Image (cartoon, rainbow, N blue to C red):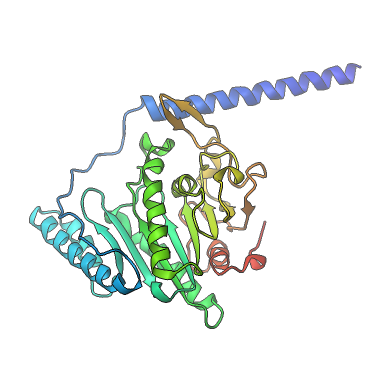
């Protein structure tokens, strides 16, 4: 009886410590999302023309869309140069290059870009990359590098006769890493309809039989979760995710296979997995996607950090390519 009583006291103490930790973590999230001012500098609005007017997208209009968006990027570069923003002008000029396949472009503000690598109209398997925080036209190069690395890996790894394409989707205003918005679902809620519209456009180009996988990094995993319900995709992979705002993979209400991975040196491991509704906004993202409680298919991501999931030759990139190619039995697990 003495032992039983001691066990009950110990168990109660553990629950009390866990409760205090959760309350402290939640308080930190609330403070960050509601009380603290933004510490990141706000960049002045970048002038640019409105997006090009496009015909409804399908395989026959794909080339026209690419050309119109390149022309719009070139005009945006001229406007940025006229306003003495050399960095933005240079970024826009790169996007306007003749070999760039821009499915969408909007040079206003932080910017929106959807770029295709590969032959989308003939692809059997398509990967859509959804970025996390601090991604805009000014930092688009690093996001494109991830898409390029994945495209190269798919090209090497795909079985003979399997055609692949990668879509780099910067289709929403991403939050800043040091900002109030990065701890709430607000940006993801606004982004989700645009991601759903992209998938609809991809289906119009590729047809119903093409396999589509969403590869969602960091805050992008919150966007994918908000868009997931009933979305006609085959796989959703969450990498470096702080949580999705959903309590489980089943709560995403998707027929897609849901995958999750975290690198051994990813700081996101230390993000508190708590969630609360505060003044009509959800603060924090809840259950850890790599935990058994979430119920995703957890795969190996190696020892990399938060920005290393698409590193050439990495374990995570190899497994992501296997997911895109439908080689599910070849995906490795820790």
Q: Is residue 309 visible?
A: no
Report the side of 228 relative to 197 (left or right).
Answer: right
For residue 11, above or below residue 191: above
Q: Residue at x 20, y 51 (%)?
A: 108
Q: Residue at x 41, y 27 (%)?
A: 280
Query: In this view of the protein, which residue sits in the foreground, 277 or 17?
Result: 277
Q: Quadrant of the C terminus?
A: bottom right
Q: Position of residue 289 (x, y in %)?
A: 58, 45
Residue shown at 18% from the left, 43% from the top: 44
Q: In the rendered view, would you say 231 is above or below 63?
A: above
Determine which quarter of the picture holds residue 273. Answer: top right
- Please identify the residue farthest to the left as the structure is shown: 82
Q: Position of residue 262 (x, y in %)?
A: 56, 51
In this image, 334 relative to 244: left or right?
A: right
- Outermost residue to the bottom: 160
The reply to whether residue 247 is visible in this rendering is yes
Name the quadrant containing residue 165. Answer: bottom left
Location of residue 88 by image quarter: bottom left
Left or right, 38 with reference to 323: left
- Quarter of the image with the N terminus in it: top right
């Amino acid at each position: 009886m003495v032992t039983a009583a001691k066990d009950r006291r110990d168990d109660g103490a553990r629950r009390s410590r866990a409760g205090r930790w959760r309350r402290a973590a939640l308080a930190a999230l609330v403070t960050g999302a509601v009380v603290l001012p933004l510490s990141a500098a706000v960049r002045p609005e970048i002038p640019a023309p409105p997006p090009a007017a496009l015909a409804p997208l399908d395989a026959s209009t794909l080339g026209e869309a690419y050309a119109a968006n390149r022309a719009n990027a070139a005009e945006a570069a001229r406007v940025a140069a006229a306003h003495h923003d050399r960095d933005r002008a240079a970024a826009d000029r790169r996007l306007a290059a003749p070999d760039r396949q821009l499915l969408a472009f909007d040079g206003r503000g932080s910017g929106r870009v959807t770029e295709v690598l590969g032959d989308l109209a003939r692809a059997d398997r398509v990967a859509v990359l959804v970025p996390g925080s601090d991604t805009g036209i000014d930092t688009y190069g690093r996001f494109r590098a991830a898409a390029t690395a994945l495209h190269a890996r798919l090209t090497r790894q795909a079985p003979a006769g399997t055609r692949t394409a990668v879509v780099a989707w910067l289709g929403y205003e991403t939050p800043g890493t040091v900002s109030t918005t990065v701890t709430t679902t607000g940006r993801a809620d606004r982004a989700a309809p645009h991601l759903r519209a992209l998938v609809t456009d991809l289906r119009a180009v590729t047809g119903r039989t093409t396999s589509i996988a969403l590869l969602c990094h960091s805050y992008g995993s919150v966007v994918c979760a908000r868009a997931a319900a009933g979305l006609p995709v085959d796989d959703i992979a969450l990498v470096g995710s702080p949580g999705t705002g959903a309590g489980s993979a089943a709560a995403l209400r998707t027929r897609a296979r849901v995958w999750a991975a975290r690198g051994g040196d990813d700081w996101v491991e230390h993000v508190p997995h708590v969630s609360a509704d505060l003044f009509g906004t959800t603060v924090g993202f809840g259950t850890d996607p790599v935990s058994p409680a979430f119920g995703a298919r957890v795969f190996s991501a190696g020892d990399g950090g938060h920005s290393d999931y698409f590193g050439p030759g990495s374990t995570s990139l190899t497994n992501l390519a296997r997911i895109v190619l439908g080689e599910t039995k070849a995906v490795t697990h820790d």
